[in-house]
Image (spheres, rainbow, N blue to C red):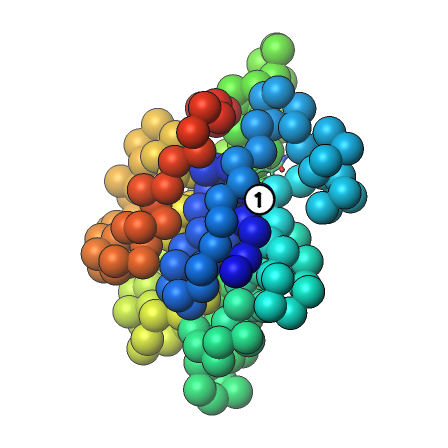
Amino acid sequence: MIDFYWVPTANGQRAAIVLEETGERYRLHPVDLMRGEHLAPEYLAVNPVGKTPTIVDAETGATVYGTLAIGLYLCDKHGMLLGDSLAMRAAVYHWAGLVASDLGPAFTGQYIFNVMAPEHLEFPVRYFDEQVIRLLSALERRLTETPYLGGEVYSLADALAYPAAATSAARLPKGLEQFPALRGWQQTVAARPAVQRAMALQAEGVRVPA
Ligand SMILES: N[C@@H](CCC(=O)N[C@@H](CS)C(=O)NCC(=O)O)C(=O)O
């Protein structure tokens, strides 16, 4: 059994998709960021970084924080979604890393300066808007070459990228309008039962930044 500390943001959805894809049994622990629960002693005892998502695996004793680390840990544990050749694993690591280390933070910056900032600051707004479009364009190019980010089959890279398309990009004024390959891929991934279960998870009583 895994204890899953999360918020239903794109990052929480990424970890939830991998939990569902790998068939892990897990218990949900919503962490209310707007009430500061991520910085409360109870949660800092689980993850001193004070951020979500985090999993605690009772079976192995492992505590793992962050979408890429959680994804790699669960796929390694179950021997799935990483690719069965070194060439495919290289592609999976490349695209999963780009999503977790570049695209996710670019969307976070874009959200902070477009939605949360008390005043409009032209430079950071433009910087993060451009980053998001540049990175989505890289995914678009890749998906005109291969059906999935890692190659011919669905992988961890797609599981981590899906919430960027379904949740984060939905905030863009034109959504994915200029990215037809991404839109087609999004529909294919959305049809997966594990993805549907993960995206339907609700954190009872927890407000999510919108
Ligand atoms: N690199 C982390 C980022 C995690 C992250 O930014 N989590 C947000 C929620 S989506 C959080 O806990 N924010 C609280 C804070 O930064 O204080 C990942 O990939 O999961």
User: Does any portion of residue 122 appear in the rendered image?
Assistant: no
Q: Left or right of 160: which side holds 187?
A: left
Q: How many labels does the image show?
A: 1
Q: Which residue is drawn at 34% across and 70% down?
A: 154
User: Does any portion of residue 120 appear in the rendered image?
Assistant: yes
Q: Which residue is drawn at 48% across and 55% down?
A: 26
Q: Residue at x 53, y 67 (%)?
A: 74
Disc 1: which residue: 5
Quarter holding ligand 1:
top right
Residue closest to the eye, 103 or 72: 72
Q: Residue at x 39, y 30 (%)?
A: 171
Q: In which quarter of the image is the C terminus?
A: top left
Q: Left or right of 44: which side holds 169?
A: left
Residue closest to the eye, 202 or 15: 202
Residue closest to the eye, 191 or 36: 36
- Residue 151 locus on image (x, y percent): 37, 75
- Residue 173 locus on image (x, y percent): 35, 27
* Residue at far top of view: 119
Please name the amino acid that badge 1 sits on. Answer: Tyr
Within 10 Å of disc 1 (Cα), the crowding (few <14, some 14-19, many 20+) is many
Ligand 1 within 8 angstroms of badge 1 C-beta: no
Q: Quadrant of residue 155?
A: bottom left
- Residue 22 locus on image (x, y percent): 42, 67
Q: Quadrant of residue 120?
A: top right
